[in-house]
Image: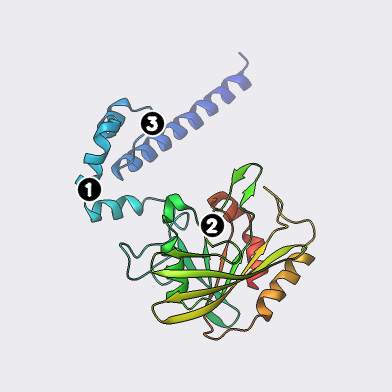
Amino acid sequence: MCAFGKVMLSECDDISDEDDAYAREAAVIFEENGGFYYNNAVEISKIKLQVTDLPKYVHSLYLNDLEEEFQKIPYGLVKAYDDDTRVLVRGGETDYINASFIDGFRRRNAYIATLGPMAKQLGDFGQFWRMVWQQKVEKIVMVTNLVEGKKTKCEQYWPDHYQRNMYGDIKVVCKDEQLYKDFIWRHFTLFKNSEKRSIHHLQFTSWPDKDIPDDVTAFIEFRHRVNALASTFDGPIVVHCRFDIKLWFRNTDNYSLFLGL
């Protein structure tokens, strides 16, 4: 090998040694913080559970253990941004619902952003309607279809036209439903004990599956229609798309367009 080649080989060895040292240092820090590599069979064996043992393991966990694991989720991914923005639902078995407040233009907590309601997370949808009632919501904006590409994206959490359903302790009656080119407007009446309220439900139906609209004109007109509806309690507007966290982030710009941020 020529002298030049020996010099290059020597320099590559030095770089390789530096990289190895850095990798070892990073690995030590990672493991000291409780992490482990997936090719480490010994560590993996310590956390393996048989399916039959899973219920017993879950019951053995304390709330602090669950909170510790929850904090390991990448910040802002599937949990609320912080306690100031998380929507709390009172009066049920839990105060949790996957929903957060969002500020509007010169108005705090102008909106509630949530995922499309699904029965496997919300049961009879009572938690969703309890949130609507407690937050004095008068407008619900739905930016998805129920089914797209033969897949359920959101379940129907409201009664059919001229029908009524009980969701937890709240009765919802669909008084009217009108179909337009790009959206559907529904008028609900909510009853709880001796009190009743009116709710506008507007569903944008022209959002393409796994994509965004080519022309935002219809969407902007839809937003104007929502804002033109009168409110009595001046509560937040609930906005949701489908039950798909990846699509939620992919449509952030369009949510911003609707919310007017």
| Apparent side of residue 213 relative to residue 120 in the rendered image (left or right) | right
Q: Nearer the viewer, mark 1 or mark 2?
A: 2
> Which of 242 and 70 lies nearest the eye of the viewer?
242
**In this picture, residue 20 sits left or right of residue 29:** right
Residue drawn at x 40%, y 51% is 73
Q: What numbered label is drawn on residue 116?
A: 2
Q: Are marks 3 and 1 in contact (CB under 8 Å)?
A: no
Q: Callout 1 environment at 10 Å: few (<14), some (14 to 19), or many (20+)?
A: few
Pointer 1 residue: 61
User: Which circle marks residue 121 in the picture?
Assistant: none
If you read the primary sequence from the N terminus, does the residue marked by circle 1 or circle 2 appear first? 1
* SS at badge 1: loop
Q: Dot 3 lies on which element? A: loop
What percent of the width, then of the height, locates residue 252?
62, 60
Amino acid at dot 2 = Gly
Q: Position of residue 98 (x, y in %)?
A: 45, 60
Closer mark to the observer between disc 3 and disc 1:
1
Mark nearer the N terminus (3 vs 1): 3
Furthest residue toward front: 162
- In front: label 2 or label 3: 2
Q: CA distance from mark 3 to mark 1?
A: 24 Å
Report helix, strand or loop for mark 2: loop
Amino acid beneath label 1 = Leu
Q: Compared with residue 222, is residue 54 higher up or lower down, i.e. above or below?
A: above
Tell me which amino acid carries mark 3. Answer: Tyr
- From the image, tell me which residue sits under label 3: 38
**Vertical side of 89 occupied by 124: above or below:** above
Q: Quadrant of the N terminus?
A: top right
Name which quarter of the figure residue 43 lies in. Answer: top left
